[in-house]
Image (cartoon, helix red, strand yellow):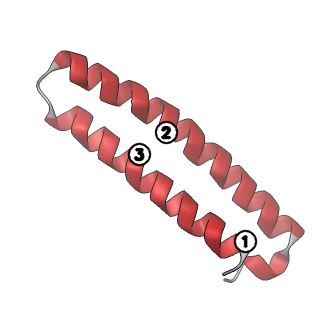
Amino acid sequence: MTVGVKMQQTLASAQSVLANLNSFALETQDQAAKAMFNSLAQTQKTVCDQLSQRLQYIQEQEPQYKQQ
């Protein structure tokens, strides 16, 4: 498994976590839990953005990863 494929899988997993956190925030009635999930989602969004930037960098530096 190449670095590019691993990065794509990692980004997909991170985005899945983000979606789950947003879903939990919408579904809960507990305001403290809602605030916690929203805060975690913001942090996870930062993680996703950073992973996405890194993946883009890898693809620019190593074009063979782009299609994998």
Q: Residue at x 71, y 78 (%)?
A: 2
- Dot 2 or dot 1, earlier in sequence: 1
Pointer 3 with pointer 1, Cβ within 8 A: no
Q: Callout 3: helix, strand or loop?
A: helix
Q: Is residue 58 left or right of residue 40?
A: right
Q: Residue furthest front?
A: 1
- The answer to whether mark 2 and mark 3 are in CB contact below 8 A is yes
**What amino acid is at disc 3?**
Leu
Task: For the residues labelled 2 and 1, say whether their Cβ atoms are less than 8 Å apart.
Answer: no
Q: Nearer the viewer, residue 9 or 66?
A: 9
Measured in 3D between alpha carbons, the distance from the residue under mark 3 to the one under mark 1, in whole angstroms, is 22 Å
Residue drawn at (56%, 61%) of the image: 10
Q: Residues within 10 Å of mark 2 (few under 14, many from 20)?
A: some
Q: Which dot marks residue 18?
A: 3
Of the two numbered discs 2 and 3 on the same chain, state the one appearing first in sequence.
3
| Quarter placement of the N terminus | bottom right
Would you call the spot at circle 1 few (<14 residues within 10 Å), some (14-19), or many (20 or more)?
few
Q: Amino acid at mark 2?
A: Gln
Question: Where on the picture, by quarter, is residue 56?
Answer: bottom right
Q: Position of residue 49 (x, y in %)?
A: 61, 45
Quarter that holds the C terminus: bottom right
Q: Residue furthest right?
A: 61
Query: 6 above or below 39?
Result: below
Query: Please, which residue is most extreme toward the left here?
Result: 29
Q: Is residue 39 left or right of residue 22?
A: right
Q: Residue at x 31, y 47 (%)?
A: 20
Q: Nearer the viewer, mark 3 or mark 1?
A: 1
> Residue tagged by mark 2?
44
Identify which residue, 1 or 57, lies in the foreground: 1
Task: Work out how far the residue at label 2 is from the one at label 3, CA to CA, in angstroms.
Answer: 6 Å
> Can you identify the residue that label 1 sits on?
3
Which callout, 3 or 1, points at the residue further toward the start of the chain? 1
